[in-house]
Amino acid sequence: MDIKIIVAAHKFYMMPRDKMYVPVHVGAAGKKSIRRSFLRDDGNDYEGNPLGDGAGARDNISNKNGSYCELTGLYYAWKHMDYEYLGLAHYRRHFSAVPFPIRWMVSQVQLGGKDGLDTNSNPHLARVLRLCLSKKKAEKIFQNYDVIVPSKRRYVIESLYSHYDHTLDGEHLDLAKQVIQENYKEYIPYVEKVYDRTWGYMFNMFVMPKDLVDEYCQWLFTILGKLELLIDTTDMTGFEARLFGRVSEILYNVWLQKKIEEDGIRVKEVPLLSTEPVNWWKKGTAFLRAKFGGEKYTKSF
């Protein structure tokens, strides 16, 4: 199987050694390359010259990274990479090869700038990355399943819609539903179902066969393109402007739910592996302030 999982990154970071993983510099347009081993999402090589016949340099959305986040890497991979299966992960979030998070090991990771992210300087991070899903294990999963997703993120006292509304701006999801109603109305029952549930497959992470990737990306980027016409990001902060990347996390659940119920695709949940410690106290406190105090998120946690 030709499986490629792109790893979205905006800076240098140690990557899994399995050749299945392809580091991608997202938002590369107009910027200096990270390293030769990182593919750029603007279709240029390390020196900034167009790759191959220049198709990638002509057809990319790298300059939208400020609002589309990791999706600029997904768009480039969808359009210009060869694969049988394509996945998306993040430089600090991966699919795990082990059945539970190794929090004690992650807690040992101490980041200290570029040198601190080198394998020789940071053995703890290297050990954590060795726990990432391997190509061999992914191939085994695809013998019985059609799609790999990260384990459900449960919000318990919030629906996906109410959580987004309390922490960010529910109008984004309202407008996304409007676009779907006007262009893909057969998805509306699934929009309502997903918006109302208290869990989701988050972070835009997945691994899927090419036919599903083609179908999903065509659907997603059509919706986001129309949504852009309805939301003005001019006066938003950098954090607020990343809304299209956030909305897409929920839209993936909408698309996937329809595929599960109507086409019977089989989904395998794989644990999420964070390479750095997560401050759950800070995240939880911000969540409660948003829900009960009306304080919107102003930064990532």
Image (cartoon, rainbow, N blue to C red):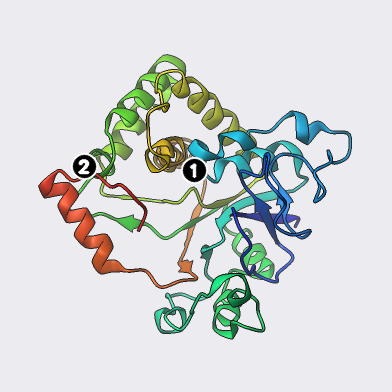
- The numbered disc on residue 196 is none
Location of residue 271 in the rendering, given as x and y in whole percent from the top left corner:
45, 66
Residue 24 seen in render? yes
CA separation in Å, label 2 and label 1:
33 Å
Location of residue 257 in the rendering, given as x and y in whole percent from the top left corner:
42, 40
- Amino acid type shown at disc 2: His
Residue 156 seen in render? no
Residue at point 58%, 77% (across, down): 116
Residue at point 35%, 59% (across, down): 301
Q: N-terminal of the two: label 2 or label 1?
A: 2
Q: In the orientation shown, which residue stands out farthest toward the top?
A: 182
Q: In the orientation shown, which residue stands out farthest toward the left?
A: 292
Q: Secondary structure at mark 2?
A: helix
Crowding around mark 2 (Cα neighbors within 10 Å: few <14, some 14 to 19, many 20+) is many
Q: Is residue 188 above or below residue 264?
A: above
Residue at point 63%, 75% (across, down): 115
Is 157 displayed left or right of 82 in the figure? left
- Amino acid type shown at disc 1: Gly
Residue at point 59%, 29% (across, down): 218
Is 28 displayed left or right of 270 in the figure? right
Q: How many marks?
A: 2
Location of residue 192 in the rendering, given as x and y in whole percent from the top left corner:
29, 32
Q: Secondary structure at mark 1?
A: loop
Location of residue 59 in the rendering, given as x and y in whole percent from the top left corner:
72, 29
Is 57 displayed left or right of 280 in the figure? right
Q: Viewer-proximal residue, 179 or 146?
A: 179
Q: Which residue is mark 1?
A: 264
Is 164 displayed left or right of 300 in the figure? left
Q: Which residue is mark 2?
A: 166
**Quadrant location of the N terminus in the rendered image:** bottom right
- The answer to which quarter of the image holds residue 132 is bottom right
